[in-house]
Each structure stands twice: as C-alpha cells, then as structure tokens.
Image: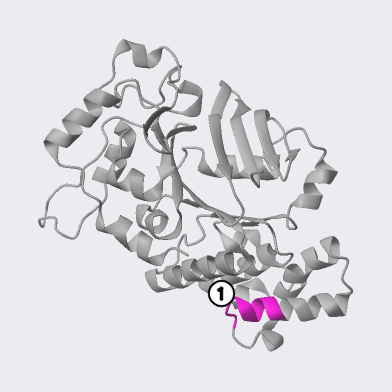
Amino acid sequence: MALLEVRDLSVELQTHRGPAYAVRDVSFSLEPGETLGLVGESGCGKSITALALLGLLPENARVTGSIVFEGRDLVGLPERALRALRGDRIGMVFQEPMTALNPVHTVGDQVAEPLRLHRRLAAATARKEAIALLDRVGIPDAARRIDAYPHQFSGGQRQRITIAMALACGPDLLIADEPTTALDVTIQRQILDLIRELVAERRMALILISHDLGVIAQNVRRMLVMYGGSVVENGPTDSVFANRMHPYTLGLFAARPGLRGMKGQRLVTIPGTVPELVDLPKGCPFAGRCRWTVGECNAALPGVREVAEGHGARCIRLELVAKERDLAAPALTPALSQRGREQQP
C-alpha cells in the first residue's frame, strides 16, 4: 500500500467573480522514502495542493477527489482528526519562516510544542528533545539559544528551526514548500543538503515544492510540472529533463537563463500572460499561449498520455510537438539532470 495516494484532486475557491479552480484533477502516489517534486511558476497550484493535503484550505474551498494517507481518506475528515495528523505523521516546512514562527514565543517552546501535544511529553523532556533537534539541524549552541526568539536568528537559522519543528515527531511525510526562498545560494545549499540527509536518515517521503528546476533536478526522483492548477507533465525526473514533452514544460526549460548567453541577449519568454483562475480555459490550461493550440484544445481537459515508462503528459498534439522539438534541437540530457543523479539519496 502506498503511503499517500491522491486521486482526481480538485480544489474550487469561491471569489467575488465566481468559482476559481485552483487545482484540477491532480493525481499522484508516494511510497515511504520516495521523493517527489512539484514545479511550476507562481500561482500554478503547487502550494494549494500541499495545503489540501493538510486540510489547511480556506473555509470557502470545495475539495473533491481523494487523499488517502496510510489507508485513510483525508477529504472530509473532521478537523480534530486532521490536527492529530499535522505535525505528527505529516510535517510541513513553510516557505517563509518569519511568518511560520510565532514572534512572541521562544523557538524552544515552538519546537517542543508538537512533542507535548502529540507525544504527551513532560515539559522538561520536551525541552531536552527540542535542544537535540535544534542541534541536529545545525543551530550553534542550541542549549543556550533555545530560549531566544525568532527575530534573534538569521533567515537561514529560522528555516532550520522550522525544519526542526516539522521533524519533531518523526513524520512519515515531509512537505517542504519553497524552503530556500529569499536565502543566499550558500545557505540554500546547506538547507537542501540538510533536508536530503534527514529524509534518507529517517526514510521519510518528501514532497518538495519549487519553481527552481535546478533544485528539483538535484533533490527528487519524480516530478510533477503544474500549470493553471493542473499537472501537465509528470514522470521520473531524469526522463522529464531529458525528454520533456508538454509545450509548457518546453517553455519553462527554455526560459532558464544560461551562462553561455551573449551579453545583451534577451531571455526567452513564454508568449501571452498567465490566465486568472476564474478565467481558465475549459480545456487545456495552456491553450492560447501554446503555438500548437487548435480548437479541440479548448474542448476539455486532455487526459494523460504516456510517452515513456512512468512518464506522461496532458496534450492532444504530442506527436507534432515532439517532431518539431527534435527538429529544432535534439533532446539531450541537461547537466542539471546529471548532477541530480549524482546527489540524490
């Protein structure tokens, strides 16, 4: 049995302009110790998908489909039952640690809180465990600094503290939502290395959310490419990088700035603008921005077509897209993918 199995997950939000379909027909599964990446530009539905797994959506959200975790469907589960899972069996690292941490409580109290709530540890025992966790994630002199407040730590240290909180009860699933946002490159690498070590050490499943293709290549074995609330391409990371098929995936990769570009050369962009969630096409969310768009693309959301083992894409014109792609430039495995193979646990 899979640790997590998501089937046909859709999230509809009510707005003053009508319903907004933030997530549409998302499906994936995750085994213990497996790593999965969600990639796409801002507003594509990555974070909403993660919040749906935790039952942290706005009150006006309507969720359909199923989220089966350890054999139990979380959709429609009472809030009390969801609270018992959050911070215990499922941990989450939020993308902005300064808003994830409470400024009026010490970091020690915040790291110890899940241990007191879920493990029923006495205050002194929970404090001792919190010191060990802070030390494990690299907070220097943890025993002395446990009574400090979030503003007394650097951005990288605050992110380490949120990781300690997420790992306090030894969850089976860790969700990391843009865990390196606003951190410098050196600290980013340290945080990602720490997450990778802890996932391997504790055999946790990992969902890593990022807009950075390099981060995805280096840290996960499977990936989902999202656009307009839908998964437009999915598969093993190496396969997607080497043989990207969906027009949006092609555009996303082409837009990466490269070191070999000429000075003054304009960056490649995807034409058009991202539609608002209330204005998404009935069919393919990328229809209209894609140069292969035909009338049929707007009729209905395309089904997933398998292009290689475990690798699929939502597009009705895959043969034509692949033909033109291969004529323009042979599909070669990028260096990013090679680095990913070398560094994965």
Q: Nearer the viewer, residue 21 or 175?
A: 175
Q: Is residue 71 left or right of residue 341?
A: right
Residue 148, visible in the rendered structure: no
Which residues make up the magenta segment? 132-139
Q: Is residue 330 left or right of residue 119?
A: left
Q: Nearer the viewer, residue 342 or 264?
A: 342
The residue lying at 82 percent from left, 38 percent from top is 78
Q: Which residue is mark 1?
A: 157
In terms of secondary structure, where does tag 1 sit? helix
Q: Is residue 286 left or right of residue 270?
A: right
* In the depicted structure, whether residue 130 falls above or below residue 88: below
x and y percentages locating residue 187 in the rendered image: 45, 72
The residue lying at 74 percent from left, 68 percent from top is 110
x and y percentages locating residue 98 in the rendered image: 60, 63
Residue 137 drawn in magenta: yes
Residue neighbourhood size for the residue with mark 1, other residues' Cα within 10 Å, grouped as few (<14), some (14–19), many (≥20):
many
Q: Nearer the viewer, residue 274 or 177?
A: 177
* In the depicted structure, whether residue 221 falls above or below residue 104: above
Which amino acid type corresponds to the residue marked 1 in the rendered image? Gln
x and y percentages locating residue 137 in the rendered image: 59, 75
**Colouring chosen for the image of the structure:** one colour
The residue lying at 50 percent from left, 69 percent from top is 191
Name which quarter of the figure residue 161 lies in: bottom right
Main SS class of the magenta portion in the image: helix
Q: Is residue 305 left or right of residue 125?
A: left
The residue lying at 10 percent from left, 56 percent from top is 262
Name which quarter of the figure residue 307 lies in: top left
* In the depicted structure, whether residue 260 falls above or below residue 249: below
| Placement of the N terminus among the 4 image quadrants | top right
Residue 323, visible in the rendered structure: yes
x and y percentages locating residue 305 in the rendered image: 40, 26
Residue 268 drawn in magenta: no
